[in-house]
Amino acid sequence: MMNRKHWMWVVAGALVLVVGLGLWWRPAEGEGVADVAALEEASAPEVPASEAPRARPAVAPKDVAAGAERPSEEPRGATVVALGPGDVPPEPEVENPPPQENEPIAPELPQTAQWKLEKTTHITGLLGRDVERLERERETADTRGDDARVRQLDTLIQRQRGRLVGLREEIRVLTEEAAKESAAQ
């Protein structure tokens, strides 16, 4: 007996074949045209001759050749809305507008030792929380018996602890610099 995946491939192939044939096959010129015309005539409601829509007068070929348009015609697809009280008409488009003036960029705040110390302390706290989360995840993987995940998490924890040691050393150095900075002020 065929498994489910095999049937899915068979059905998908059949659908592709049907869609391909539907896109490729077109009726011959005389085939089906009479049927469509008869269908349209049968489904069209009967309209008395007095209510029949009037045909639009054709544009004279000399106007088309010269590219002239009748002044009373609106461009196709354009919507004209009358301005109400308080409306401001849009400004005409300019071919090359002047460059826009940007707001000045605020100067960067000084990166003092105190500032660096605060940032490093914050990063160290986040990294410490990440190590704790990884240790909890490692314990969960160990209880599940997932040895591969335990080894992976051990490697991650080891790397993060190495970064923590470096950051703590940097905090020690920045603390001294911040103390010197504050004494100098």
Image (spheres, grey):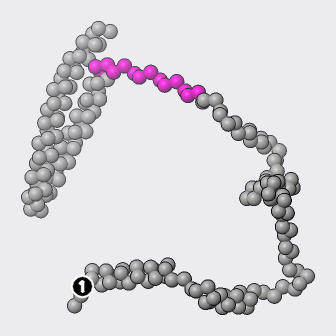
| 180 left or right, relative to 67 | left
> Which secondary structure is most common in the magenta stretch?
loop
**Helix, strand or loop at disc 1?**
loop
**Can residue 139 be seen by looking at this rendering?**
no
Q: In this figure, what is the number of numbered marks?
A: 1
Q: Is residue 30 left or right of residue 145?
A: right
Q: Does residue 53 appear to the left or right of 148 in the view shown?
A: right
Front residue of 47/108: it is 47
Farthest residue, direction right: 50
Q: Residue, x 15% and y 46% (percent of image)?
A: 156
In the picture as drawn, the residue positioned furthest to the top comes out as: 184
At horizontal 85% and vertical 73% (from top left) the residue drawn is 55
Segment colored magenta: 101-114
| Quarter where residue 4 is shown | bottom left
Is residue 101 at least partly visible in the picture? yes
Quarter holding the N terminus is bottom left
- Please check the rendered image and state whether residue 113 is part of the magenta-colored stretch, yes or no: yes
Residue at position x 26%, y 17% in the image: 178
Is-magenta flag for residue 69? Answer: no
| Residue nearest the observer in this picture, 174 or 18 | 18
How many C-alpha atoms fall within 10 Å of the one at disc 1: few (<14), some, or many (≥20)?
few
Q: Nearer the viewer, residue 160 or 82?
A: 82
Given residues 149 and 74, the one toward you in this image is: 74
Q: How far across and down, in percent of the image, does residue 130 sit?
A: 21, 44
In the rendered image, residue 45, in percent from the top left (x then y), is placed at 78, 87
Q: Which amino acid, by three-letter code, is at mark 1?
A: Asn
From what the image shows, is residue 120 above or below residue 84?
above
The quadrant where residue 94 appears: top right
Q: Is residue 50 left or right of residue 64?
A: right
Which residue in the protein does label 1 denote? 3
Q: Quadrant of the C terminus?
A: top left
Location of residue 46 by image quarter: bottom right
